Amino acid sequence: PPQEQQWQVTARVLYDPANLETPAGAALPDLRSILTQAAGAVWPAAAGLPAADLSATLNFGQDLILQTTGLDETRLLIDTGAVLP
């Protein structure tokens, strides 16, 4: 049955806010500078080390909410790739 289907996914983030370019008079950064950010780091667990990616299971018919475990709120902690061990 479709409702029993699952897929393993791996998510990576881009995060390099120092290199975002905001055109004069614009409120938001240029899309090209957003999409060309350097690879970032993600914290799978608040008490752990950062990683280059985050693995999760996507279940049929359910939203997949990526988050850092061990936090009171649903958040995904990210940083620049410079913090990777």
Image: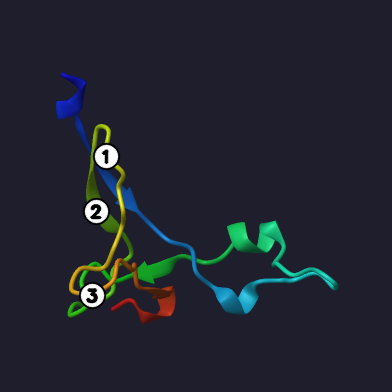
Q: Position of residue 81 (x, y in %)?
A: 42, 73
Q: Which amino acid type is marked by label 1?
A: Gln
Quadrant hosting residue 16: bottom right
Quadrant in which the N terminus appears: top left
The residue at 33%/68% (across/down) is: 75
In the image, 29: left or right of 36?
A: right
Residue assigned mark 3? 72
Q: What crowding class fits label 2: few (fewer than 14 Cα within 10 Å), some (14-19), or many (20 or more)?
A: few
Query: Alpha carbon of mark 3 to alpha carbon of mark 1: how far?
Result: 22 Å
Q: Position of residue 27 (x, y in %)?
A: 74, 70
Residue assigned mark 2? 55
Precedes in sequence: disc 2 or disc 3: 2
SS type, badge 3: loop
Q: Looking at the picture, tell me which residue is in the foreground, 85 or 69.
A: 69
SS type, badge 2: strand
Q: Pointers 1 and 2 in contact (CB under 8 A)?
A: no
Query: Alpha carbon of mark 2 to alpha carbon of mark 3: how far?
Result: 20 Å
Vertical placement of residue 48 versus 31, above or below: below
Precedes in sequence: disc 1 or disc 2: 2
Q: Position of residue 44 (x, y in %)?
A: 24, 67
Residue assigned mark 1? 62
Q: What crowding class fits label 1: few (fewer than 14 Cα within 10 Å), some (14-19), or many (20 or more)?
A: few
Q: Looking at the rendered structure, which numbered label has been put on residue 38?
A: none
Precedes in sequence: disc 3 or disc 1: 1
